[in-house]
Amino acid sequence: MNPNYFLLYAHNIPVRGKERAALYNLQAGHILCIPLVLTDLIEAMRTAPVETVRQQFAPTRPELFDAYLNFLLRNDLGFYTDEPTLFPPLSLQWDTPHHIQTAVLDLDFDQYDPVAVLDQLDGLQCRHVEYRLQTGRGTARQLEALMEANQGRGFRSVSLLIDYQTALGQPPQWVHRLYEACPKIEFMLVYNAPYAGKSRTHPAHIQFIQDDIRSASYRASATRRRHIVNVGYFTEAQQFNPYYNRRVCISQAGEIKNCLQHRRSFGSVLTDRIDAVVSRADFRELWLASPDRVAGLRDSELRYCLFMPHELVADPETGLFRFPASSPACQLLV
């Protein structure tokens, strides 16, 4: 006797868009675009036997139904079973103990004390710290001391974007010295370098580029269309904006922002405590700008995987968020 039910593996989740759907394979990290009708079949087979669904959707063209089913089997997306209740769907709940997931510090060593900021971030159980450093304004010892300051704190990882500066020593020696001063560094990007390529000694962790990360052209390329397909990103996107959620940025002047590129500031580390600022409802507004609440994105089947570090504006009339007309995000949704 053939099994009665057909289910997708729990890590394969269909998402409806306005004109088509997408099947997210959260285990393999890729997406298949599928017709909306296949999503209807998948949902129906969740609770009804295959033969029942075949008769419901294709009573006169069973071969069409079988073609869809064979597509799922051929791509190893699901399986037959007689006991569907033994295979519950993947939980889409998302949570984290970190009050702040990512902190971005833009530094020139003149405007504020970065170590004092690290103390506050540690109290917020910050998970990851990204430093954007202009080496022309700091000494080699200041940089090494900053990297050493990450030790003994609860940050899980550190990334470092640093301007190429021969005054600190002969590259790449000083770069390697900085990297080795902080075992928590997972990635170093050296910009404005005279050459491009990966470090020979640490190719997976250190990269040199000739671009200036502060230029408009580089920022535009950094926001080009990208897809992130995994369980963490997908589940976070159900309720939150994965880019802005639990993120805080400190500008060179010490301003506390949602994003360094934004004009809006919510305070200053020179006068305000970070924990007080990030607890405010207005600061957290963009945290809640989930893809389902963004006009122009909420109808896309790719909404739960698109990396969207673009500015958003709240629309009080609709309760949604929107991209400014000038935003490059408007060209990413087609």
Image (cartoon, rainbow, N blue to C red):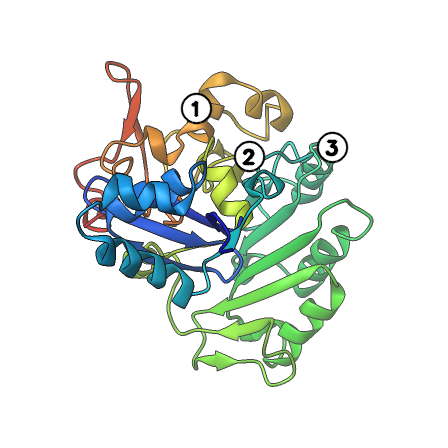
Q: Position of residue 243 (x, y in %)?
A: 45, 42
Q: Residues within 10 Å of mark 2 (few under 14, many from 20)?
A: many
Judging depth in this view, the residue of 160 and 241 nearest the camera is 241
Q: Which mark is residue 68?
A: none
* Lower position in the chain sequence, tag 1 or tag 3: 3
Q: Amino acid at mark 3?
A: Gly
The residue at the far bottom in this view is 200
In the image, is 31 to the left or to the right of 134? Answer: left
Gap in Å between the C-alphas at discs 3 and 2?
Answer: 14 Å
Identify residue for label 1: 285
Earlier residue among tags 3 and 2: 3
| Numbered disc 3: secondary structure | helix
Above or below, comparing residue 78 to residue 281 in the picture:
below
| Residue at the far top in the pictured view | 317
On the rendered structure, is 272 left or right of 285? right
Crowdedness of circle 1 by 10 Å Cα count: few (<14), some, many (20+)?
Answer: some
User: Label 2, on which residue?
Assistant: 246
Percent position (x, y) of residue 209? 43, 73
Q: Which residue is mark 3?
A: 123
Image location of residue 170, percent across then percent down: 61, 81
The three-letter code of the residue at mark 1 reads Glu
Answer few, some or many: residues within 10 Å of disc 3's Cα (few below 14, many 20 plus, some between 14 and 19): some
Q: Report how far apart the C-alphas of labels 1 and 3 lie in the structure.
A: 22 Å
Figure quadrant of residue 101: top right
